Image (spheres, rainbow, N blue to C red):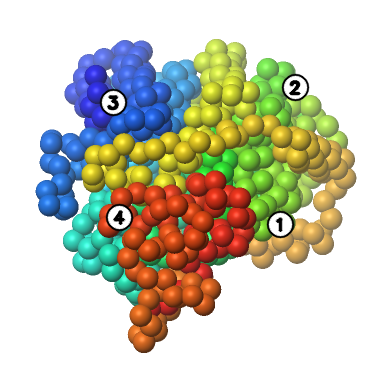
Amino acid sequence: MDTARLLPLVVAAPLIGAAVLVATGRRLPRLASDVLGCAFATAAAVLALLVLFRAGHPGPEAYPVEWVGGWRPVGGSGVGIVLVGDPLGAGLAALASLLVVAVLVYSWRYFEEPPRRHTGSFPALILVFQAGMCGFALTGDLFNAFVFFELMGVVAYALTGFRVEEPKPLQGALAFGVVNSLGAYVTLLGITLLYARTGELGFAHIGRTLDAGEPDGLVLAAFVLVTTGLLVKAAAVPFHFWLPDAHAVAPTPVCMLLSGVMVELGVYGVARVYWTVFAGPGGLAHPDFTRALLVLGVLTALLGAVMCWQQRHLKRLLAFSTVSHTGLFLIGVAVLTPEGISGTALYVLGHAGVKAALFACAGVLLDRYASVDEHELFGRARELPEVGALFAVAGLALCGLPPFGSGLGKAVAEEAAGHTVAWLPALYVLVSAVTGGAVLRAGLRIFAGVGRRPRDGQESGPETTGEEEPETGRRLGRIPVPLLAVPAALLAGSLAVGVVPAVASAVDRAGALFTDTGGYRRSVLDGRAAAVPASVPPHWQATGIVLGLLSTALAITLATLAVRRPVRTGTAALLAPVRRLQSGHIGDYVAWLVAGTALLTVLTVPGVRWDRGALGLVVSGGAVPRSADSWTSAICPRCPPSGPRGTDPPWSASPCCPTWRSLGPPCRALSTSRSSWSL
């Protein structure tokens, strides 16, 4: 079967499974409902993997494109729904599907017996969640991306408050729903502005139409609004407050999906929208996008790490770790190079398995001891050496320890970031050490009883603790096999990402194609095959190994010092104002959303400067004509034009050409940043 024909099936398979479970769940026993859910999730995962294996190779299969229902563009305009199986999107769809399978298997013996005639409720919701994630990763249409992302949000809202008989899940779900709904309205307003300007909704259509005109305040406003909604889903600072509150009360399998892949899809959305819509001469200048994402990424990484270290509630600790790593992912996207995208993609792959495994271990503790409080569990889990070993390995992998995939992704991303700002690799090391050290500290106390027993009030606050109830209905005596097998398999997958060369090679091709804006547009709109640039795949290098070992050593040192020395009250008092920001009040979170939107606007406003007397673009003092024929030669005389004249600006592929790479920063600034340009 043609690869493009498989794309709708990746989305349809879980939706069909959800419909079957809703229709038959009232009559089926729990085992049958669980088996059906796993079967449909596995089918979607197999289809996504088939698309992934076929995509990214030279020829028409590099970008399989399917216009659903045969509604192809006519005369350069289109109204149909388009699905694009580019390697990065297909890889995220496969990752989401595999995580859903792991979650459903984990849930076999995890939840208490559901109410009679409702055995299919949980797997049906998970399957709809899977369809939303796969659809968002594969869509080539901005409005349908919004629809799929909101489908994810609605289902995640229901899953967060799944235990409706308890007040805390409802409170967490309400905060989740309100903040994410406001983010959705903001995104929809940005889409409306783009549609008013271009009359199009497809990524490629909008980007090509914008590049035929001039950037102005409307384009900037659309970028800010659309990006704000995506950053809310990505839980970037200051839009992140909903995530820890939701993780603290959501069922553990749901947390595995929220931190494992949903948040990362928000980062993917930011990168996808920029590269396909706003990266051209009619959009936002590269330096301004880089500046905005770097500022938000650094803030997110640092604040998330500080808050992670302060937690004693394990699920909140892991949630803030996710926030911190989201900052690192945003930094990798901000550098706007194929290496940055490839490194971040590897980092996401490795992080997904590690973080889901950590939540799985936390779930075992919750159902065994009815608590996830680091202090309350001090030394009680010595009787669970298998869980302790998995928790420790996952903590080390979170630090970036070679040869895990999280370590390889961190090494590649921090190297790419270091070419943009010299001190960014140090930030990667620091954040990995603090977040990994917090996990190792909790593991030492809970599974080994190392150090002094913490006193009440030490390293705690009103937002770090809470009464917990087992999600199995009663405390576990013997740990079921799925609760141990799933985290072990997830860690094995993260290890495979770091040691299997074929994975790194595939991700490298995906990153190169992802940043080829012209190739994407020609494949989607003109039906022409995209060329796969030749490059050196990511691999372990001495610098990356040393920095990975350094961050791991720092994490072990921090964890050891934390369990053996009491916390100084001065440090806790210094960080108290930061901790009070996580107030739990929805009104505060809405205010921070508005403040974050204003901050993003301020960071990107320099991207549009008007000079009505100018005849062309001004790049570093030289006029650059608007025509595609002269664009490349005006920016970089030594870069040969790429792409046919009069269609897409040939600068879109210049970052991948050997001349661009050999010229270094001067040519990079001219060929990609269009710095100091006015109209």
Can residue 269 be seen by looking at this rendering?
A: no
Q: Classify 10 Å Cα crowding around label 3: few (below 14), some (14-19), many (20 and above).
A: many
Residue 158: x percent and y percent?
A: 35, 41
Question: N-terminal of the two: label 3 or label 1?
Answer: 3
Q: Is residue 644 above or below residue 134?
A: below
Quadrant containing the N terminus in the rendered view:
top left
Is 361 situated left or right of 509 in this image? Answer: right
Q: Which residue is mark 1?
A: 422
Q: Nearer the viewer, mark 4 or mark 2?
A: 4
Q: Are marks 3 and 1 in contact (CB under 8 Å)?
A: no
Q: Earlier in the sequence, mark 2 or mark 1?
A: 2
Q: Are marks 2 and 1 in contact (CB under 8 Å)?
A: no
Q: Position of residue 80 (x, y in %)?
A: 16, 45
Q: Percent x, y for residue 360?
A: 56, 28
Residue 645 disc label = 4
Q: Give the total of numbered labels.
A: 4
* Residue position for label 2: 382
Work out how far the residue at label 4 is from the one at label 3, CA to CA, in angstroms.
30 Å
Q: Mark 2 or 3, which is nearer the eye? A: 3
Q: Which one is nearer the viewer's eye here, 209 or 595?
A: 209
Q: Is residue 102 visible?
A: yes
Residue at 39 percent across and 30 percent down: it is: 58
- Which residue is nearer to you in this view: 561 or 625? 625
Q: For marks 2 and 3, give the CA distance.
A: 50 Å
Q: Could you say which disc has been placed on residue 3 in the image?
A: 3
Dot 2 alpha-carbon crowd within 10 angstroms: few under 14, some 14 to 19, many 20 or more: some
Of callouts 2 and 3, the N-terminal one: 3
